[in-house]
Structure formats: C-alpha cells, structure tokens
Image (tube, coloured by chain):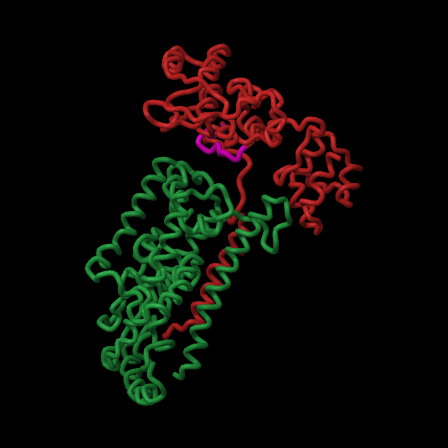
Chain colours: A green, B red
C-alpha cells in the first residue's frame, strides 16, 4: 500500500475525531449562548453531562437500586453508555480512539510534543513506573463509581478535565478540575494521551472489553518482518510486535499500527473477525506475494 | 474478514447515530431535566428524586408540598416566585455553617429532609443531620413531627444566616423574588401556560411573537419561538414591557 493510500485511511479517523470535537464545542457554545439568552445553533442545548456516556456509568448503581439517575445526569447519558458498550464489544474502545473529544485534544497537543522531542516523545516515563501507573485508572474508576453510589452526586465533575475544558466559561468548573486539565494538557506534550493512559475511568472500563472483544487485532507471525513500526506508532506504547493477538487493556482501536496505515506488509497486522482456518493459509500465500511489493513499495 | 477504517466509520454512524435516532423515537434519549420527581410504588412523590433544578412550584404540583410552607420554614422572602425559585437557589441565599467540624450548605438535601418530615414520606439523608432552627420550629408549630422526631430535631438545629444581609429588603434578587414592577421574569423554562397564568393575554403573546398561541401550552416559550425562527433573547423581555 502506498503512503498516499495510507494517509487517506488515516484521514478517515481524523475526520471522525474532528467531527466529534466540533460537535462538543458546539454543545458547549450553545450552553453559553443559552445562558446569554441567545438562540442555540443547529442542535439545541443539551448539557455536556447529557452527551457523556460516563454519566451513565456513574449512575448505574442508583438506576438499578432506586430507579433514578443521579443529579445532573440525564437519560441520554445512560442510553449513550449502552451504545458505546455495544460498539466496544464489537470493535474494542473505538470510543477512546475515534470519538472522545478530550482524547482528540490530547492527541493534537501530542503532535506538537512529537515535533519538539522527536524520538524521546512518549518515552519519558520509565517502563516499570509506566506499567504500574496504567492500573491507576482502575482505582479511579472504582473510587468514582463507589463514591457516586454512596453520595448520589456527580463527584467526578469536580476533577474532570473534559468537563473543565469544554465548560471553561462556567462557574460550575472547579479549581481542582482546572488544575487537572492544565496538568494533562502540559503532560500531553511529553506523553501521548496521559489522561487516557493513566487516569481516565471510562477508558479503564472500556479497556476491559479488549479481553473479549469480537473483532480482534491479530498479527501474522509468519509474515511479520519485525520492523517494530507498529510498536513505535502505538500511542498507548503497546508491544504489538510481540503479540499474536493484541488484547492489551490499553488498546484504543486507533488502527494506526495496522497494515492499512503503518505496517508495511499486507495481511500481517489487522483487525479481523470470523477468520476461517482454511483462509489463513491462503492469506499467507497472498501476503508472501504482496510482501515484496509492499516492502519495495515504500518503507515507513 | 478484515476490518478497515471505513468499517469503523460505518459502525460509528450506525451504532451511535442510529442508536440515538432509535432511542429518540422510543423516548429514551432525553437530554433535558425532568420536571417532576418520580412517584414511588405507592404513588407518592419520591423525595430521593427531588433535584436542585426543580422549582418550588413543581414540588408543590407533584409532591403536594405547599411552596408557601418552604418559603416560611426557611425564611425566604415572602415575594419569592415559586415558578422560578429552584431548590439549588438556597445555597445562593444562606451562609454555609460549620457543624461537627464540617461545612454544611443549606440546599436541595435540606429541602428533601424538610419535605420528608412535612409530608411524612420516608427519606434517609446521609448528609443532613441538622436543620435550621427556624425550620424545626415551623415543623413543630404545624404539628408535623412525632415525639421522637421532635426530640431529635430540636437537639440538632443551627441558626440560619443570610449570605447577603440585604436579602430580605433589597430588590436585586430578581431571579428568585418578584420583579418590582413587572412581576414576571420570562426564562428559558417558562411555559406558555405560565405566561397565561401570569396575566399575559393571547393578544399580547401574538403581538410579541407574531404567532397565535398553540394548542399545546405546556411547551416552553423558548422552544416555541426557536421553532418559529425567532431569537429568544430578543423577545423574552417584551412580554413585560
């Protein structure tokens, strides 16, 4: 696959990311306009809480025990949560890699960091510490869900950088959340998606789906040339090149590592479903043929 | 089968986009607040579901708790407008107090406990263990407490203090008390029925909006004018001119 074709494929995800980022900015703008007594533009005036699926997660206990949503959470959050769960069960945490506007902002800032620090970017944190920190988001998930169940209040909003960023004009934003936002945005210059990797409770929950998702990221060991391009491009620092089936809890299904975008050998690294045993051999034969073509066609 | 970026794009459109459309059709995608607390299995107002965004008027309609009782029990201004005063507005009026080493703010949960005691609806709060002295006295005077409740609450009171000492006399609390001359403030949640209830005539409505009053009067003025392509901010004050 030529570089031009790879870039076109990359643009699909970029377009989706920009669409959802623009949508959330519009929601935020309409909230502000609404408070000023102005006409909302295009989509009415839902609150940021109403369009965040994590609202559904934190209210799940209250919903099933008391039949009600916690303060500030609307039914739309609950519905969105189930839709996102369905999408994640099929394709993994596509929400994190394609939809979440906060992840997109981190990623865009990360592009600046990558230009500044080159190869050092996303490699500042020692491996052992990095691996340990990645479980922090599960602790946060448990703390948030349990404390919300006990208090019946949306406590997470007090330190949620997503809410702070897209509601920055509002008096509802706490100093703590602004501090967290500042740290995450600055941190994004050094580490790719620091909030997603270490702190995001929704990312933690969706990450669990990687263990049993239907569409899996598979690497063909026989055709892999061990160039490690997949490892280098992975925003979540997953060792893709050593796995046969990537089921790392941090995968965000961004498709960057796949042979559609980065992997230079066709049919070597991609998301697949319902693979038949017989077709494997055929694909191996095919890939051997295309291997030379791909490698000579242009290495990344 | 190999899954490509285009498949993910389609999945997002179908699952998220289609899911939202379907949920909207099934009335499962509500992005705005619910105007009434839900009912319990016994058909009474569920205190747990009372929210800061509920107005005194909505609480009166759906929980049968007279707005006047809340106004009196908490020492709110007598000219407080029940249609506009939201439970969360309490925290804009009263000073936080320190109780057993922790800061306590008079807000929605305080009203929930008051409602529970006044209406005899079971509710166990995990944050309100004290009530304003004025509120407890009101409950006692109106014979709303059992002997045990009376004993507990009379021993767990604090003195209410206004954040702004001019609260009872100044005319600047326009959102929550009567506007001096006009007597009506039209906000985003004001319904057409509320306009009529506040003395706005059908002619006046037509003069301001350019449209006749619709049959469905429960719709908010804001939503109505937006649908007609009119800027809400431009007309909302014209009803009281």
Q: Residue at x 51, y 52 (%)?
A: B23
Instruction: Residue B147: give x, y in percent of width and height.
Output: 39, 10
Q: Quadrant of the N terminus of chain A?
A: bottom left
**Up/down of B13 relative to B138, above or below:** below
The magenta stretch is B45-54
Instruction: Residue B11: give x, y in percent of width and height.
Output: 45, 65
Residue A252 visible in the displayed image: yes
Splitting the image into 4 quarters, where does residue B97 fall? top left
Splitting the image into 4 quarters, where does residue A115 fall? bottom left
**Up/down of A131 relative to B227, above or below:** below
In the foreground, A34 or A190: A190
What main secondary structure does the magenta stretch of the protein show?
loop
**Up/down of A130 relative to B183, above or below:** below
Residue B50 among those drawn in magenta: yes
**Up/down of A125 relative to A12, above or below:** above
Residue A59 visible in the displayed image: no
Q: Residue at x 71, y 49 (%)?
A: B230
Residue B75 among those drawn in magenta: no
Q: Residue at x 53, y 27 (%)?
A: B63
In the foreground, B34 or A212: B34
Instruction: Residue A78: give x, y in percent of width and height.
Output: 44, 48
Residue that lies at the very extreme toward the left in this rendered image: A128
User: Does residue A112 appear left or right of residue A138 in this picture?
Assistant: right
């Amino acid at each position: 696959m030529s570089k031009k074709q790879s870039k076109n494929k990359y643009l699909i995800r970029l377009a989706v990311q920009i669409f959802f980022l623009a949508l959330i900015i519009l929601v935020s703008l309409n909230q502000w306009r609404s408070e000023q007594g102005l006409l909302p533009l295009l989509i009415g005036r839902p609150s940021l809480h109403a369009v965040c699926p994590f609202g559904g997660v934190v209210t799940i206990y209250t919903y099933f025990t008391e039949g009600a949503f916690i303060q500030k959470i609307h039914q739309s959050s609950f519905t969105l949560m189930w839709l996102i769960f369905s999408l994640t069960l099929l394709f993994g945490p596509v929400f994190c890699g394609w939809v979440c506007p906060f992840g997109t902002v981190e990623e865009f800032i990360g592009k600046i960091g990558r230009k500044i620090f080159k190869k050092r970017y996303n490699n500042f944190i020692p491996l052992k510490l990095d691996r340990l920190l990645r479980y922090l988001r599960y602790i946060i998930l448990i703390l948030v869900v349990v404390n919300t169940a006990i208090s019946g209040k949306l406590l997470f909003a007090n330190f949620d950088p997503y809410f702070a960023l897209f509601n920055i004009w509002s008096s509802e934003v706490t100093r703590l959340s602004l501090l967290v936002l500042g740290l995450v945005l600055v941190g994004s210059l050094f580490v790719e998606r620091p909030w997603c990797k270490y702190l995001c409770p929704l990312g933690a929950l969706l990450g669990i789906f990687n263990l049993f998702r239907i569409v899996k990221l598979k690497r063909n060991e026989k055709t892999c040339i061990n160039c490690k391009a997949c490892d280098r491009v992975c925003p979540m620092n997953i060792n893709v090149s050593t796995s046969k089936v990537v089921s790392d809890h941090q995968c965000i299904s961004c498709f960057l590592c796949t042979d559609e975008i980065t992997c230079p050998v066709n049919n070597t690294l991609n998301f697949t479903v319902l693979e038949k045993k017989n077709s494997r051999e055929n694909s191996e034969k095919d890939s051997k043929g295309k291997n030379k073509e791909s490698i000579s066609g242009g290495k990344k | 089968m190999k899954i490509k970026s285009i498949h993910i794009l389609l999945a997002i459109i179908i699952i998220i986009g289609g899911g939202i459309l379907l949920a909207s059709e099934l009335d499962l995608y509500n992005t705005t607040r619910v105007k009434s607390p839900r009912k319990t299995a016994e058909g009474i107002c569920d205190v747990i579901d009372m929210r800061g965004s509920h107005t005194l008027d909505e609480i009166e309609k759906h929980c049968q708790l007279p707005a006047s009782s809340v106004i009196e029990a908490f020492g709110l201004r007598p000219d407080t407008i029940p249609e506009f005063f939201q439970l969360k507005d309490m925290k804009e009026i009263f000073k936080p107090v320190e109780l057993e080493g922790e800061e306590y703010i008079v807000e929605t949960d305080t009203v929930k406990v008051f409602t529970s005691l006044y209406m005899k609806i079971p509710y166990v709060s995990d944050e309100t263990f004290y009530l304003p002295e004025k509120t407890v006295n009101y409950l006692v005077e109106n014979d709303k407490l059992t002997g045990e409740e009376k004993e507990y609450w009379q021993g767990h009171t604090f003195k209410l203090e206004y954040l702004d000492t001019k609260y009872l006399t100044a005319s600047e609390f326009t959102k929550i008390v009567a506007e001096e001359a006009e007597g009506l403030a039209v906000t985003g949640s004001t319904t057409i029925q509320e306009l009529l209830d506040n003395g706005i005539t059908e002619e006046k409505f037509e003069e301001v909006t350019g449209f006749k009053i619709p049959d469905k009067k429960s719709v908010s003025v804001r939503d109505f004018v937006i649908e007609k392509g009119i800027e809400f901010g431009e007309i909302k004050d014209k009803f009281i001119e």
